[in-house]
C-alpha cells in the first residue's frame, strides 16, 4: 500500500490550512502549555506545578506521578509513599478516560521530534527501512521492570528520552542531547515511526491504560471514504485504522485498538469528514 507523499492537499482546499491542521495545532499548543507550566515557577517564581513529568505537585497540593515510574519504584522493592500512589492513580485514571496513548501525542516532548522525522521522511520519499515488530515495546516494558528489579535502581530513567529531554529543556542537555538526536535520525533514516510506534516502553505501558478508554476516534462517515490513503500516511499507528474504516470482521466504526494515540491527524487530513472524536459506545 503506497501512501501519498503530500497528504491533506484536498483537505486544505476544503477546510483551509487552519481547518486541515486543527488537531495538530491543538496538540502542539498542549505540549507547549505543558512545558510552560513546568517552566513558570523557575522563571517567574509563580509555581503552578512543581516537579517534572515523572512526579509533580499541582498548586503544591495535588500529587501527580507517572504510573510507569511508580511500577519501576515498586520493582526495586521500595515502599511507595501514599502521595506517589495517589498521584499515579490520578494520572492512570485520566489516561484511562482520554486514551492512554494520548500521553504520547498530546504531552510527551519526544513526540515533536518523531513527528518531525516522520514529516521529513515523507517529504524525502524515504520508503525503505527496518520492519520492526510492534510488540517490541511490550517486551521493552517487561525488560525495564526486570532490569530495575535486578539492579535495584530506576535504570530506565538514566536513559529515558522523555526525562532527559524534559530536564534538558530547562537545565541544558549536555551529552544527553545524543539520545534525542539518535531517535530523530533512527526514525528518519532507519525505521518509519520506529521509536514511538515500535520500541518505546513508555508508549507500550500507556497503551495498556488505553484498552478501556472512553474517548475514541470514530469512522462514522466511512461510507464516504474515497480510498485516498491520506489517513494512513499521517497516522503514527496506521494498523489501527483498517478495522474501523473498512469494517473488517464486521467491526463497527470505532477505533478500539489500544495503540491509537488520539492525535486527530486522520480527522485533519480527511477531506470527506470520515473521522471524528466520540465515545467508544
Image (spheres, rainbow, N blue to C red):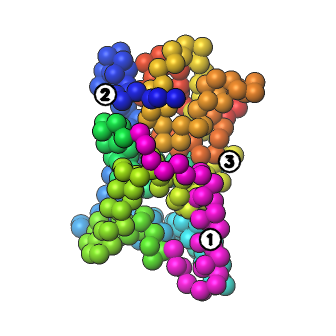
Percent coordinates x, y for residue 50 in the rendering: 40, 70
Residue located at (39% from left, 59% from top): 183
Where is mark 3, residue-wise?
A: 211
Q: Residue at x 66, y 30 (%)?
A: 243
Element assignment for label 3: helix
Residue 196, relative to residue 69: is it above or below? above
Q: Earlier in the sequence, mark 2 or mark 3?
A: 2
For the residues carrying marks 3 and 1, which lies nearer the camera in this image? Answer: 1
The residue located at (59%, 38%) in the rendering is 239
Rendering coords of residue 127 (x, y %)? 41, 39
Total numbered labels: 3
Element under disc 1: helix
The image shows residue 263 at horizontal and vertical percentages of 47, 40
Write down the residue under mark 1.
Answer: 143
**Alpha carbon separation for disc pair 2 and 3:** 31 Å
Q: Which residues are magenta?
A: 127-156
| Figure quadrant of residue 205 | bottom right
Assess disc 3: are there few (<14), some (14-19) or many (≥20) residues with their C-alpha within 10 Å of its C-alpha. some
Give the mark nearest the N terminus, 3 or 1.
1
What's the magenta bit mostly, secondary-structure-wise?
helix
Say what secondary structure mark 2 lies in.
Answer: helix
Identity of the residue drawn at 68% across and 47% down: 211
Q: Residue 33, position in %: x, y?
A: 34, 52
Above or below, 268 against 73 in this view is above
Residue 31 inside the magenta-drawn segment: no
Quadrant (top left/top right/bottom left/bottom right) for the C terminus = top right
**Residue indicated by mark 2:** 18
Q: Which mark is residue 232?
A: none
Amino acid at each position: 500500500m503506497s501512501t501519498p507523499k503530500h497528504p491533506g492537499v484536498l483537505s486544505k482546499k476544503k477546510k483551509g490550512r487552519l481547518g486541515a491542521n486543527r488537531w495538530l495545532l491543538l496538540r502542539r499548543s498542549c505540549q507547549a502549555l505543558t512545558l510552560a507550566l513546568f517552566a513558570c515557577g523557575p522563571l517567574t517564581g509563580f509555581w503552578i506545578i512543581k516537579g517534572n513529568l515523572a512526579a509533580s505537585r499541582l498548586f503544591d497540593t495535588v500529587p501527580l506521578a507517572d504510573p510507569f515510574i511508580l511500577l519501576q519504584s515498586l520493582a526495586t522493592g521500595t515502599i511507595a509513599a501514599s502521595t506517589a500512589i495517589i498521584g499515579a492513580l490520578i494520572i492512570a485514571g485520566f489516561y484511562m478516560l482520554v486514551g492512554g496513548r494520548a500521553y504520547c501525542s498530546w504531552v510527551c516532548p519526544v513526540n515533536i521530534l518523531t513527528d518531525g522525522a516522520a514529516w521529513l521522511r515523507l517529504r524525502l520519499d524515504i520508503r525503505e527501512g527496518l520492519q520492526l515488530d510492534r510488540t517490541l515495546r511490550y517486551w521493552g516494558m517487561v525488560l525495564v521492570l526486570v532490569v530495575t528489579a535486578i539492579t535495584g535502581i530506576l535504570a530506565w530513567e538514566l536513559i529515558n528520552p522523555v526525562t532527559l529531554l524534559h530536564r534538558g529543556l530547562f537545565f541544558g542537555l549536555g551529552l544527553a542531547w545524543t539520545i534525542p538526536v539518535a531517535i530523530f535520525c533512527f526514525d528518519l533514516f532507519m525505521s518509519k515511526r520506529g521509536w514511538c510506534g515500535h520500541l518505546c516502553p513508555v508508549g507500550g505501558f500507556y497503551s495498556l491504560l488505553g484498552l478501556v478508554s472512553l474517548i475514541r476516534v470514530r469512522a462514522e462517515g466511512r461510507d464516504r471514504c474515497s480510498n485516498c490513503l491520506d489517513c494512513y500516511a499521517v497516522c503514527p499507528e496506521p494498523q489501527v485504522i483498517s478495522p474501523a474504516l473498512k469494517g473488517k470482521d464486521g467491526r463497527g466504526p470505532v477505533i478500539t485498538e489500544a495503540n491509537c494515540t488520539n492525535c486527530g491527524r486522520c480527522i485533519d487530513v480527511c477531506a470527506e469528514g470520515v473521522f471524528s472524536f466520540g465515545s467508544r459506545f
